[in-house]
Amino acid sequence: MEANNCGRVLIVDDEANMCQLLETDLRLRGFQPTWRTSADEALDLVKTQDFDVLLTDLRMKGMSGTELCERVTANRPDIPVIVMTAFGSLETAVAAIRAGAYDFVTKPIEMELLALTLSRAVKHRELQEKVKVLSEEAAQGGHFEEMVGGSPVMAKLYDQIARIATTEASVLVCGESGTGKELVARSIHRTSHRSSGPFVPVNCAALPETLLESELFGHAKGAFTDAKAERRGLFLQAEGGALFLDEIGELPLAMQPKLLRALEESVVRPVGGDQEVPFNVRLITATNRDLLTEVEEGRFREDLFYRINVIQLDLPPLRARGTDTLLLAQRFIEQAGKRSQRNVLGISDPAAERLLNYSWPGNVRELRNVMERAVALTPFEKIAVDDLPEKIRDYRSAQVFIGGDDPSELASMQEVERRYILHVLQAVDNNKSLAAQVLGLDRKTLYRKLKQYGVDE
Ligand SMILES: Nc1ncnc2c1ncn2[C@@H]1O[C@H](COP(=O)(O)OP(=O)(O)OP(=O)(O)O)[C@@H](O)[C@H]1O
């Protein structure tokens, strides 16, 4: 939206005077107002013209504002509606909200407040649009940002990332090693309002405890022997953007209260400094440990856990992503082929079958390494079984045994369901939320089935 355009507003009021007054004032404030004096005319107009927000009076001759609100939200749910109600008639305002209105303002209208309410509605619409576009792109293309994969578990993840784009909340990304947690963190940042700000990744496990504090918070000149000059810490380097703390489960216990305090007060105190410096940074963290167990066993502070875990994203292991393995393999073959200038086009069917059978303990990173090696080794245009490491060639998965051709061996639907649920649970290391996602069940239903099949929780 242009800088001088705060949004296209359609004003609906049966008093032309009121419309004119609102029009003049809103135009001065940078909006693009249009008005109609009946709900019918307004409905006709929204069929052919796009608006960012609709502002309507409630009590009008002919169709009421509440009905207009219902009709607009049914046909154009993307246009937020603000209703104007008489002072003190909260009931009608509530009725309008029930009819789908985004917000209401009371008469006599305070223009400052109205402008704020309209701006909020316009912003809301922009964000909704963004979420829609991102989710659609992801669902269609089998990829999202740099992430490849179109399985239901990944589509769900893309949808969650797109929704998170509109919030500022701290996100904890959980998943086994090599599942793409850093890629997810980057996507969260790139789709957020802060995308023009920096993305600063830090691996908490890679820094010695003594250095971590000064790396994160900075240090004053002379704070310690090597501190010849003042240094801005990573929190301040991420100003206006996001700080990604990878392997947060490895954060030493002594550092945890310091990090918690910084997050709670949005200030850092550089080591050896006497001044607190405020920061404006979104925190994204990742772990391959089960942080709740870490909390229970006293290795991770509970208060810090809740602080960083406002939103939790569970990244499924590769073995739970079905044929995404082949999509990813193809991507890695193309990348490796380009780098090494080798003309490898894809994977032979028998090799693809082996890739789908294997359990991928090292997840996407392991797949990438295997594909790079295969591209370098293969004499063919398509990767063959022999180009794969032995452990993958010979891997036998614990498949869900359904039975042979003998009718007495065949399992009932219920038995197949029981075995399959157990198989999925095993594949996702007993992570129930993830198992529910893979199975396409809600958690409650999964728990009910587990109980029914006598599986301990
Ligand atoms: N969905 C994906 N699409 C394309 N590439 C991916 C995907 N997921 C992971 N990768 C690639 O796999 C490699 C490992 O990913 P990443 O480093 O993000 O994993 P991680 O979960 O953060 O690992 P660790 O826990 O070891 O830090 C990277 O090269 C990354 O680009």
Image (cartoon, rainbow, N blue to C red):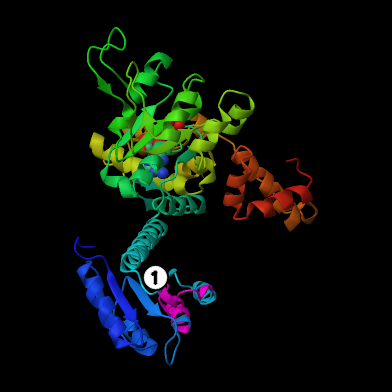
**Is residue 289 or residue 319 the one in the foreground?**
289
Q: Position of residue 68 (x, y in %)?
A: 43, 82
- Residue range highlighted in magenta: 67-90
**Is residue 405 or residue 454 the one in the foreground?**
454
The residue indicated by pointer 1 is 78
Find residue 203 and report its image quarter: top left
- Residue at 25% x, 40% y is 338
Find residue 234 and report its image quarter: top left
Q: Residues within 10 Å of mark 1 (few under 14, many from 20)?
A: some
Q: Amino acid at mark 1?
A: Asp
Q: Tell me the quarter of the image containing the C terminus.
A: top right
Q: Position of residue 278 (x, y in %)?
A: 33, 33
Question: For ligand 1, which image quadrant applies?
Answer: top left
Whether residue 221 is in magenta: the answer is: no
**Is residue 124 or residue 341 the one in the foreground?**
124
Q: Residue furthest top?
A: 225
